[in-house]
Image (cartoon, rainbow, N blue to C red):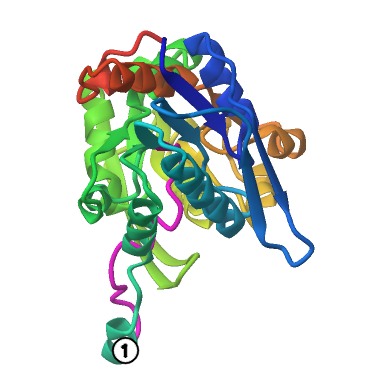
Amino acid sequence: MPNIVLFSGSSHHDLSQRVADRLGLELGKVVTKKFSNQETSVEIGESVRGEDVYIIQSGCGEINDNLMELLIMINACKIASSSRVTAVIPCFPYARQDKKDKKGSVERWSRAPISAKLVANMLSVAGADHIITMDLHASQIQGFFDIPVDNLYAEPAVLQWIKENILEWRNCIIVSPDAGGAKRVTSIADRLNVEFALIHKERKKANEVDRMVLVGDVKDRVAILVDDMADTCGTICHAADKLVSAGATKVYAILTHGIFSGPAISRINNASFEAVVVTNTIPQEEKMKHCPKIQFIDISMILAEAIRRTHNGESVSYLFSHVPL
């Protein structure tokens, strides 16, 4: 693949290396460091003049530092006369802050920021010409940009994992832990030709669920919870308990972005899951050491194919349903 340079940020070097290997490329030379006052410094170690540049940086770990590093890398490549700069952001930072939150008083609601829009503006101003991301928390985030955005889906990888690892998948039911994920679970249920259910949740405050109501029949079936992300895991662990009490024989959770902050690992260890399956948009190696229930699906092929098609001027619109994994 001529005239292409692939750089890795600090957030997820393992995924970047997997993508580079699938494309048959070497990662570009870049040095990132911090000054004593914690300012981020980036040095691009090779020429990018006239090159099609792709920078892989996920919104995880030290999110604010990694976001700033990505912005500086984009700008450094842009002012070094690259022909195009594409930011490959497997897990988009601040994606949950996509609208004014209706919780609390009207006055508090009117002062709430839309931080995902701010991140979109920052990426554009830094010089990004194109964004590749995966399973955005809210698809309207694509509309925050005035540049092309390709929102890829982990669905083909999820379907393959279910068929290869759950023997009773034909007798399963796909469950959404909230009403917002209904589209996601109905799509997977339709492709597996199984039924779906959803759980309606009411929150007292962020990261704390007050009450759950199950809509659907899970009795004597394998229940598969599907969501785009899990942070402290209060929702999915409560949902697992609800499904078991409703008669589910086994409970699995499949998530695109496994953030797993705070008490998440201890909650998963104590919950009634057979397995909690996540993609590697976020590094999971350390968390897997402390929680044997966590497994990961490699999505580097999906990202690599998106980069290849973008570089060759091909469409990635239906990539999520055509990638051979």
The x and y percentages for residue 63 are 57, 55
Relative to 41, residue 163 above or below:
above
The answer to which of 257 and 58 lies nearer the viewer is 58
Which residues fall within the magenta stretch?
A: 87-104
Quarter occupied by the C terminus: top left
Q: Quadrant of residue 119?
A: bottom left
Residue 262: image quadrant is bottom right
State whether residue 325 is above or below residue 154: above
Q: Quadrant of residue 34?
A: bottom right
Q: Is residue 142 magenta?
A: no
Magenta: main secondary structure equals loop
Of residue 258 and residue 245, the one placed in the foreground of this image is 258
**Residue at horizontal 64%, vertical 35%?**
284
Q: Which residue is mark 1?
A: 105
The residue lying at 67 percent from left, 47 percent from top is 265
Can residue 231 be seen in the rendering of this structure?
no
SS for tag 1? Answer: loop
